[in-house]
Image (tube, rainbow, N blue to C red):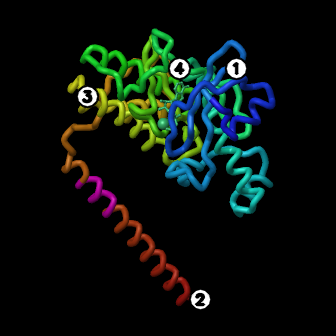
Amino acid sequence: MKIPKRIQPLVEEGLVDAVVRQLMSGKEATVYVVRCGDDIRCAKVYKEAAQRSFRQAASYQEGRKVRNSRQARAMEKGTRYGRKMQEEVWQNAEVDALYRLAAAGVRVPRPHICFEGVLLMDLVTDARGEVAPRLNDVELTEALALTYHACLLRQVVLMLCAGVIHGDLSEYNILVDADGPVIIDLPQAIDAAGNSEAGPMLERDAANLASYFSRFAPQLADTQYGKEIWALYGAGLLTPETVLSGRVATDDRPADVGAVMREIALARKEEEERLRREQDMREANAVSWSYR
Ligand SMILES: Nc1ncnc2c1ncn2[C@@H]1O[C@H](COP(=O)(O)OP(=O)(O)O)[C@@H](O)[C@H]1O
Ligand SMILES: [Mg+2]
């Protein structure tokens, strides 16, 4: 097809030879199948800031690193330079996350480069070499749902061990290739350590998975994998090998009301004694004063 204007710079740089077809046009990006030499790849063209939606929200931006403080100040002030920097940080966030996750062994498309707001990565394909379907479009049996759910939880754990939380994990951002689920769409990925919303976001990602797969495997509905993973991570106990139960230990021993009341009574007695001692001291001082 005719080269779209936004892909032209990549053709000029020799990064792309031809555009095969448009795959999708969503809220955040337009995705094309492209040819690079002998390889068929995927080109994700990010929309301009003004056309994008919710994912610029502050909770996703928090903890995102920029190279120096001048850039950080410019971004805060919203100067033209600042907005350009912000745009660059946003556009590079996905390729950065993909490199980090691919290195950690997470099933993501292999990234190649992000250039002029276009991310080049491997095209995820199915067993026949066709573009892989989204999880949402795949017929599942109970057994397959359980297998995919377990595989994806493992990916979530691997990601968290690499310090990354997807932040928008759903059946629409998971493709299914010949070997199982592949995670895509990471421009909003967040830094697990530097973001105060990290826990809730991880729990939401895990809850999305449980909710989707529970349509095929109802036993997944009341699991608590997100809470469990976050608690283990917080305690420094999460590793890629951690075996999960889907349960969190809750303290369900009956509260010992008697012991609590005794504690309160003791504290009150101590306070009364302290006040009495103070009073005695004041009186003693007053007496010694009057003798002078
Ligand atoms: N590497 C890839 N291989 C195959 N298809 C892809 C790839 N990346 C994206 N797609 C397709 O493009 C769609 C949109 O991509 P996505 O990264 O989810 O962007 P967004 O949802 O922000 O528009 C996906 O649902 C998927 O169908
Ligand atoms: Mg998407």
Check disc 4 and report the residue beneath it: 124
Q: Residue furthest front?
A: 2
Mark 2 or 4: the one toward you: 4
Q: Earlier in the sequence, mark 2 or mark 3?
A: 3
Check disc 3 and report the residue beneath it: 214
Mark 3 to mark 4 CA distance (whole Å): 25 Å
Q: Earlier in the sequence, mark 3 or mark 1?
A: 1
Q: Amino acid at mark 1?
A: Cys
In the picture, measured across the screen, residue 94 lies left or right of residue 225, that is right
Is residue 248 visible to us here? no
Check disc 2 and report the residue beneath it: 292
Report the front residue among 213 and 287: 213
Residue under the image location 27 percent in, 59 percent down: 265
Instruction: Check if residue 267 falls in the magenta segment.
Output: yes
Which secondary structure, mark 4? loop
Residue under the image location 66 percent in, 32 percent down: 2
Q: Report the magenta residues as a range.
A: 261-268
Q: Quadrant of residue 163?
A: top right
Mark 2 to mark 4 CA distance (whole Å): 95 Å
In the picture, measured across the screen, residue 145 lies left or right of residue 89, that is left
